[in-house]
Image (cartoon, rainbow, N blue to C red):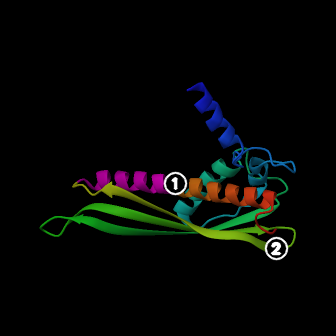
Amino acid sequence: MAAGVLLLAGALAGCGLRPLYGEHPAGGTTVGELQTVRILPIADRPGQQLHNALRNELNPRGQPVDPRYNLSVDLEIQEQEVGVRKDETATRANLILAGSYRLVRNADKVLMTRGVAKSIVSYNIVDSEFGTYAAESDARDRGIDQLAQQMRLRLAAYFERLATGAVAP
């Protein structure tokens, strides 16, 4: 049993996997690169919430003083009613949030990477107007947090590939 565990540990050590947020072979860290990203303002109240969630995910100590990159995001939110009673009133809805992002290097205004993060969250439509409003608001908050986490993960993976030479700068 112990020999099997040692063999498995040796195999995993030689597979080339490294922690995403660890130090790069050439120096620096992915976390350090994320902290050099300035998040540009995003329109409307949900955009402000996404901006704040991204700031907490990428650089929780605040916007960088001398950013190397600018991150711009366009947020789109759609509502889709999915549960319908016999009298054709909705009982359940989905919020579909899509954030199109672009990371631009400030030194030469080169587009480094771009993509779309998507989140679908559901909530119940109840008889109480306030209850429905609260459920929708909570669903929107959850969706925004999911978008921010997806974008952080995608940017971290991009910076990791950039540091290892898997993508051209």
Report helix, strand or loop for mark 1.
helix
The image quarter containing residue 70 is: bottom right
Where residue 109 is drawn, which disc sits there? 2
Name the one closer to the observer, 45 or 28.
28
Label 2: few (<14), some or many (≥20) within 10 Å? Answer: few
- Number of numbered tags placed on the structure image: 2
Q: Label 2 amino acid? A: Lys
Q: Earlier in the sequence, mark 1 or mark 2?
A: 2
Q: Report x, y in % for residue 56.
A: 64, 48
Q: Report x, y in % for residue 150.
A: 57, 57
In the image, 126: left or right of 117? Answer: left
Where residue 58 is drawn, which disc sits there? none
Q: Report x, y in % for residue 124.
A: 29, 55
- Is 46 within the magenta? no
- What residue is rendered at 82% in x and 73% in y? 109
- Is 129 within the magenta? yes
Residue extending farthest left? 86
- What residue is rendered at 60% in x and 25% in y? 2
The image quarter containing residue 9 is: top right
Q: Quadrant of the N terminus?
A: top right
Q: Report x, y in % for residue 10.
A: 68, 37
In the image, 118: left or right of 38? Answer: left
User: 57 above or below 47?
Assistant: above
Q: Where does label 1 land, which residue?
A: 146
The magenta-colored residue range is 128-145
Name the one closer to the observer, 46 or 33.
33
- What residue is rendered at 79% in x and 44% in y? 23
Report helix, strand or loop for mark 2.
loop
Residue extending farthest top? 2
In the image, 166: left or right of 75? Answer: right
